[in-house]
Every structure is written in C-alpha cells, then in structure tokens.
Image (cartoon, rainbow, N blue to C red):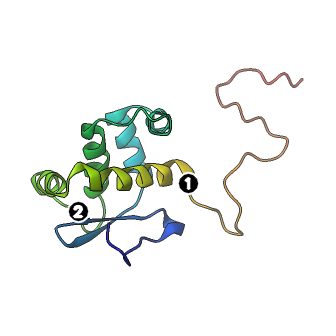
Amino acid sequence: MSVGVTGNPQRGEVVLTLQGRHHRLRPTFAFVARAEAALGPLPDLAERLVAGQGWRIGEVVTLLALALEEGPEALSEPEIEDRLLRAGAARLLPVAAQLLIQALAGEEQEGGGSAEAAPGKPEDMTGASTGAA
C-alpha cells in the first residue's frame, strides 16, 4: 500500500498498489460468496490469522485475486497473478487481512448503527427452537 492513498472506509474499501497502480478492493456479497467457496468459511480464516497460525500464500493470493477480478478496474487472471507475484507476500498479507476484516465487519447502516438483530427477536437462524412458546 502507498502512503496517502486510502479507500473509502464507509464502503469497506482497501487499496492495493501493484506496479504503481492503485486498486480499490471492496468486499461485495459476490466476493464473499466466491471467497468462501474457494477458501472455506471466512470467520475460520480470520480466526487462524488472529491465533497466530497465519495463512498460506495461496490463500492470500486467492483472496486478493478474487477482489481484483471485480469492479471497474478488473484485471485478467494472468495480469493478476503476475502483479501479485511481483508485489511479494510481505506486502500482500496486510492488505488481504484488512480486506477480510472489512468483509466480516459489514457496513454501518444509516444513522451510525450497525447491523444487529432486532430486540426481542431470536438470533438463531438454524430453525432450532428458541424456547419461546
């Protein structure tokens, strides 16, 4: 990442600079779905990072490649692989981690609140009984 180049945090954007070009990565619903299909549950990936177990470089590259394939600045697969390889793992990991955090955090709703279950409503979406009669 470059100093002075930032994404829009209200949109969950993260900026990745590859070969002098700034790419604004945003965790869309489609990105999250494709990332989970490729890497498994994203909370598990985040938990491994927080626990100090780290990520494999393939996971970092996959996460960033999926994000780079979206949006108006979309790159082809060969361009993505080439640019990520040239950037180096040490520069990619912090951006991938921030992108994952943004994907899991979601956006704030209007009025400054965050997305939460309504008061008095069960949060269990599995269909299990909540004990209410």
Residue 17, above or below 56? below
x and y percentages locating residue 48 in the rendered image: 45, 33
Residue 85 in sight in this render: yes
Residue 22, above or below 74? below
Per the image, label 1 sits on a secondary structure element best described as loop
Residue occupying image coordinates x 36% and y 41%: 35
x and y percentages locating residue 123 in the rendered image: 72, 36
Q: Residues within 10 Å of mark 1 (few under 14, many from 20)?
A: some
User: On the rendered structure, is 55 left or right of 112?
Assistant: left
User: For the C terminus, which image quadrant?
Assistant: top right
User: For the N terminus, which image quadrant?
Assistant: bottom left
Residue 132, above or below 57? above
Residue 28 in sight in this render: no
The residue that label 2 is drawn on is 74
> Which kind of residue does numbered mark 1 sit on?
Gly
| Foreground pick, 109 / 4 | 4
x and y percentages locating residue 60 in the rendered image: 30, 44
Residue occupying image coordinates x 43% and y 64%: 13
Q: Residues within 10 Å of mark 2 (few under 14, many from 20)?
A: some
Residue occupying image coordinates x 42% and y 46%: 32
Sooner in the amino-acid sequence: mark 1 or mark 2: 2
Residue occupying image coordinates x 41% and y 32%: 53
x and y percentages locating residue 125 in the rendered image: 66, 31
User: On the rendered structure, is 132 left or right of 123?
Assistant: right
Per the image, label 2 sits on a secondary structure element best described as loop
The residue that label 1 is drawn on is 106
User: On the rendered structure, is 97 left or right of 9?
Assistant: left
